[in-house]
Image (cartoon, grey):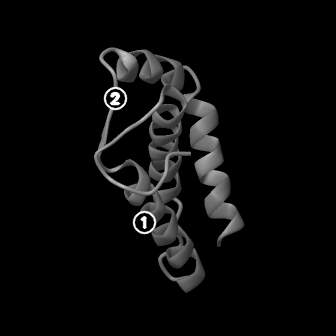
Amino acid sequence: MPPVGSGLSLSRSQIRYCLSEKIRVTAWQGQVNEYSESSVGAFNEAVRDYNSRCSSFRYRSGALESVRAEVEANRYALQLEGIRSAAVNP
């Protein structure tokens, strides 16, 4: 998990976290119970945390592309993790 901040140079594992978390949060978004304050609050907190760590970062040439390929191979499992987050926070 990358530290909070913007414009930081991230390692491959931190880039992997950001790309994976984006998939999880996107899957979660479609499952948020808009009538539940706790569901909306938990989702908003996840988005806030993601944005504070992953909204603006730097990386070495080629790192993003190779990590993206790794993450895409696990897209389905990551989407399920995001959907499970919604189920835990109904």
Q: What type is the residue that disc 2 sits on? A: Tyr
The local secondary structure at tag 1 comes to helix
Q: Position of residue 10 (x, y in %)?
A: 42, 35
Q: Position of residue 72 (x, y in %)?
A: 49, 24
The local secondary structure at tag 2 comes to loop
Q: Is residue 22 left or right of residue 9?
A: right
Task: Please identify the quarter of the rendering in which residue 84 is found.
Answer: bottom right
Q: Quick check: 89 above or below 15? A: below
Q: What type is the residue that disc 1 sits on? A: Arg
> Residue at the spot x=51%, y=32% of the render?
16
Q: Is residue 33 left or right of residue 6?
A: right
Nearest to the observer: residue 56 or residue 38: 56
Q: Quick check: 18 above or below 48? A: above
Dot 2 corresponds to which residue?
A: 59
Which quadrant, please, contains the N terminus? top right
Q: Is residue 68 left or right of residue 55?
A: right
> Residue at the spot x=65%, y=70% of the render?
89
> Residue at the spot x=56%, y=72% of the render?
42
> Residue at the spot x=40%, y=59% of the render?
52
Q: Which mark is residue 31?
A: none
Task: Please identify the quarter of the rendering in which residue 74 is found.
Answer: top right
Which quadrant, please, contains the C terminus? bottom right
Q: Quick check: 66 above or below 4? A: above
Furthest toward the right, the residue is 88
Q: CA distance from mark 1 to mark 2?
A: 22 Å
Total numbered labels: 2
Of pointers 1 and 2, the one earlier in the residue sequence:
1
Dot 1 corresponds to which residue?
A: 48
